[in-house]
């Protein structure tokens, strides 16, 4: 099979509104977590999040579209346009029917739904915009990227909770291998920083309560972790067959070597205690990529900072990699970005692409007191210069959905 490669990157994140700004801050260990500004947190147990700051949708679309579009979709359009520009590609200058879109999300525009419900109760039916439903439907992130870019091939939104962003690249690879498109804009977008989400997740106990130390709040693999930090943002990629990329003279960041999606069939929020589904996803991804475990140098971990996830992910890595697990450089970038839910895996894959490009592995910050059950190399505190041949990107979502994608150095490298 012909290799499928990534030729364009785009990002809107809590630590940068461009790919290079994001990457510089990630490698420097800069945290994007701070007090919530999106709503009044009085009475909430959790008052911190990793918000996107300074984003102006009108830098990427006209005022009319911005007013009719939910925030995660605005992020998706912005990241997609960045990725196209980075790839030196234009949908309209080629055959638009051969361009696909796979832009995934976890919860979609939860904040907009909650706000509209309050407005309806307060001011009645005529207060609701006629564009409300098309703006909040989960597939709007893909459909509006399609409309904004002109892509007229397969348009798809998959929702695998926190594994959604990883799976976008896997599905893009499948579309291209089937011959259903010649290029795909793929990624993930999320913006769910809303009172109702914080109230619900606060009741579950999934969120950290380090309100007075927000930059230290997300502590993956640390003994003192309390839970994850809510984040928001998007990442997008231009994905195409190697022959097409070479014909265009495009810069190639990475090859999508393979990927897999599995289910735990265990619990709606908790992972399988032995990491069964996660381990099977990793093994299947390696098998489909035709890669031996010892060929992986780096894992961009799911690494949420929750009590269960970090131990279970560590168990799963050991089960798959054996002694090689202790030679892997593992990063948990949520320590800086928070958990971007449906966009988390896409942003983690973006970081993996840049690790392959630059030979720099981003750190896991706040890892001050390692959990004895989490005894692998999580690249604590400081980024590491190290050549990476292949990287695994893990995503494990509520409902027991596990998506793993493997990226490696492009063929010419």
Image (cartoon, rainbow, N blue to C red):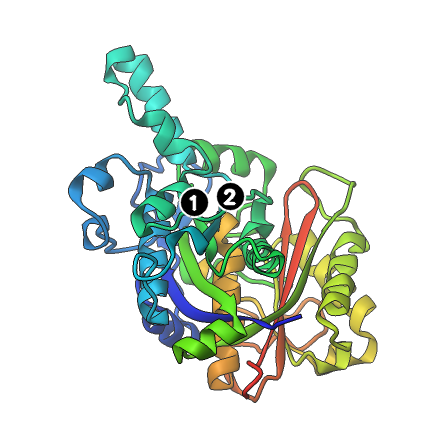
Residue 193 location, x and y as percent?
40, 42
Residue at x 59% of width, y 63% of height: 220
Local crowd size for mark 1, using a 10 Å CA cut-off: few (<14), some (14–19), many (≥20)? many
Q: Nearer the viewer, residue 257 or 383?
A: 257
Q: Is residue 257 above or below residue 76?
A: below
Local crowd size for mark 2, using a 10 Å CA cut-off: few (<14), some (14–19), many (≥20)? many
Q: Secondary structure beneath disc 2?
A: loop
Q: Secondary structure beneath disc 1?
A: helix
Q: Nearer the viewer, residue 123 or 238?
A: 238
| Structural distance between the alpha carbons of marks 1 and 2 | 6 Å
Residue at x 74% of width, y 39% of height: 267
Q: Is residue 153 visible?
A: yes
- Quarter of the image that includes the N terminus: bottom right
Residue at x 60% of width, y 45% of height: 160
Q: Is residue 22 above or below residue 152?
A: below
Q: Which mark is residue 388?
A: none
Name the residue beneath numbered marker 1.
142
- Check whether the beta carbons of the residues at disc 1 and disc 2 lie within 8 A of each other: yes
Residue 23 location, x and y as percent?
40, 73
Q: Is residue 198 above or below residue 228?
A: above
Residue 25 location, x and y as percent?
37, 73
Outermost residue toward the front in this view: 95
- Relative to 128, 348 lies left or right: right
Q: Is residue 209 visible?
A: no
Earlier in the chain: of badge 1 and badge 2, it is 1
Residue 314 location, x and y as percent?
73, 65
Name the residue beneath numbered marker 2.
157
């Amino acid at each position: 099979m012909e290799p499928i490669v990534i030729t364009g990157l785009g990002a809107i994140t809590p630590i940068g509104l461009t790919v290079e700004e994001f990457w510089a801050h990630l490698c420097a260990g800069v945290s994007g977590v701070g007090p919530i500004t999106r709503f009044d947190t009085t009475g909430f147990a959790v008052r911190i999040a990793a918000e996107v700051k300074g984003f102006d949708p009108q830098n990427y679309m006209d005022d009319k579209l911005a007013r009719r579009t939910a925030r995660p979709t605005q992020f998706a359009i912005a990241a997609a346009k960045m990725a196209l520009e980075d790839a030196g590609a234009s949908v309209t200058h080629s055959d638009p029917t051969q361009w696909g879109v796979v832009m995934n999300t976890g919860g979609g525009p939860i904040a907009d739904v909650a706000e509209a419900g309050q407005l309806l109760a307060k001011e009645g039916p005529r207060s609701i915009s006629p564009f409300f439903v098309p703006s909040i439907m989960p597939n709007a992130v893909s459909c509006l990227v399609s409309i904004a870019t002109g892509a007229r091939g397969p348009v798809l939104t998959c929702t695998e909770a926190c594994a959604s962003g990883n799976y976008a690249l896997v599905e893009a690879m499948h579309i291209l291998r089937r011959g259903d498109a010649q290029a795909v804009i793929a990624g993930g977008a999320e913006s769910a920083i809303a009172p109702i989400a914080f109230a619900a997740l606060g009741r579950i106990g999934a969120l950290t309560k380090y309100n007075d130390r927000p930059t230290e709040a997300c502590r993956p693999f640390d003994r003192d972790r309390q839970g994850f930090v809510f984040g928001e943002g998007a990442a997008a990629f231009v994905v195409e067959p190697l022959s097409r990329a070479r014909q265009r003279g495009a810069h190639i960041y990475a090859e999508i070597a393979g990927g897999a999606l599995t289910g735990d069939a265990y619990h709606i929020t908790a992972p399988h205690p032995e990491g069964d589904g996660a381990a099977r996803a990793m093994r299947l991804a390696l098998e489909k990529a035709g890669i031996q475990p010892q060929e992986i140098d780096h894992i961009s971990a799911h690494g949420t900072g929750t009590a269960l996830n970090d131990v279970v992910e560590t168990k799963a890595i050991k089960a798959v990699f054996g002694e090689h697990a202790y030679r892997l450089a593992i990063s948990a970038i949520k320590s800086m970005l928070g958990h971007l839910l449906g966009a988390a895996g896409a942003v983690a894959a973006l970081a993996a692409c840049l690790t392959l490009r630059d030979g720099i592995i981003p750190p896991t910050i706040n890892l001050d007191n390692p959990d004895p059950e989490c005894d692998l190399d999580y690249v604590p505190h400081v980024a590491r210069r190290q050549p990476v041949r292949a990287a695994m990107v893990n995503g494990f979502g509520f409902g027991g959905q596990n998506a793993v994608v493997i990226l490696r150095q492009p063929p010419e490298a």
